Image (spheres, rainbow, N blue to C red):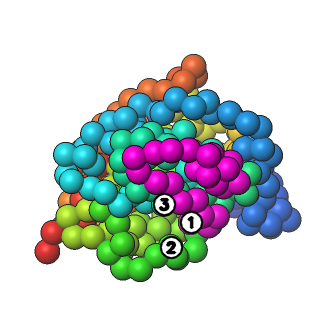
Amino acid sequence: MSGGAPSDELLSAALRRAVEPADGQRRRWDEALARPGRYGDAPSAPAQWAAARFAEAGAHELLELGAGQGRDSFHFAQLGFDVHAVDFACPGVKALRKRAGAATLPGSVHALRHDCRDPLPFADESFDACYSHMLYCMDLSTDELDRLSAEVRRVLRPGGLQVYTARTTADPDYGAGAAHGDDRHESNGFVVHFFGRELVQRLARGFELLEVAEFEEGDLPRRLFRVTQRRPAV
């Protein structure tokens, strides 16, 4: 929409966001991740692909953003990576910690509750790689994504790889449900930020953008980008 008064749909979304605090989505994810095995135990296809790239690059210390209940976290740990798994939903973090305490793995899983809208609680150049499956397309504004991207770049070591996925504007759900502006739409209580290639390019500032691949997942099916980029070595 260009110029003129905002639509009733946008006004309704703005009012709802003003009434519902910023942690409204966290409460929804708390409810979703309170169900054991919400997404199963099998690793996602992007995690399997990323693990191979990280191993080729000689990575060992891995940061995972939006780890959920850990289906990808434990795949990485099983392959020998030391994983710092971050999520803002308490049930997911509890499930991760419980499973990590009972598991015998070549690598390790350290679970931390953290909201990625805030600065990452890690020192500069702490990690060899960063991975996230659909964290970037949660209810994060473009400005918040800019800040998160800068934080990821900060905590990666020179030459470190990042692989993230996000739903695209070609996704069947794009444009459906309540509009929240900034290419964000709400469906069944969850807000999704849909990515165009322009946003991928924007978030690649300060990185070497190595690959943008399109793939599908699930029954809808969801349509996603898998983005691979690297912090420059110098």
Residue 229 position (above or below residue 148):
above
Q: Earlier in the sequence, mark 3 or mark 2?
A: 3
Q: Residue furthest bottom?
A: 123
Q: Decide if residue 97 is in sight here.
A: yes
- Image mark for residue 120: 2
Asked whether the beta carbons under mark 3 and mark 2 sit within 8 Å of each other, the answer is no
What is the spatial separation of the Cα atoms under label 2 and label 1, in whole angstroms?
7 Å
Where residue 157 appears, as percent x and y from the top left, is 27, 70
How packed is label 3: few (under 14 Cα within 10 Å), some, or many (20 or more)? many
Q: Count up the numbered dots.
A: 3
Q: Is residue 94 magenta?
A: yes
- Image mark for residue 84: 3
What is the spatial separation of the Cα atoms under label 3 and label 1, in whole angstroms?
14 Å
Q: Earlier in the sequence, mark 3 or mark 1?
A: 3
- Label 2 sits on a secondary structure element that is loop
Report the front residue among 144 and 39. Answer: 39
The residue type indicated by label 2 comes to Leu
| Magenta stretch bounds | 93-116
Q: Is residue 175 left or right of residue 31?
A: left
Q: Quadrant of residue 18?
A: bottom right
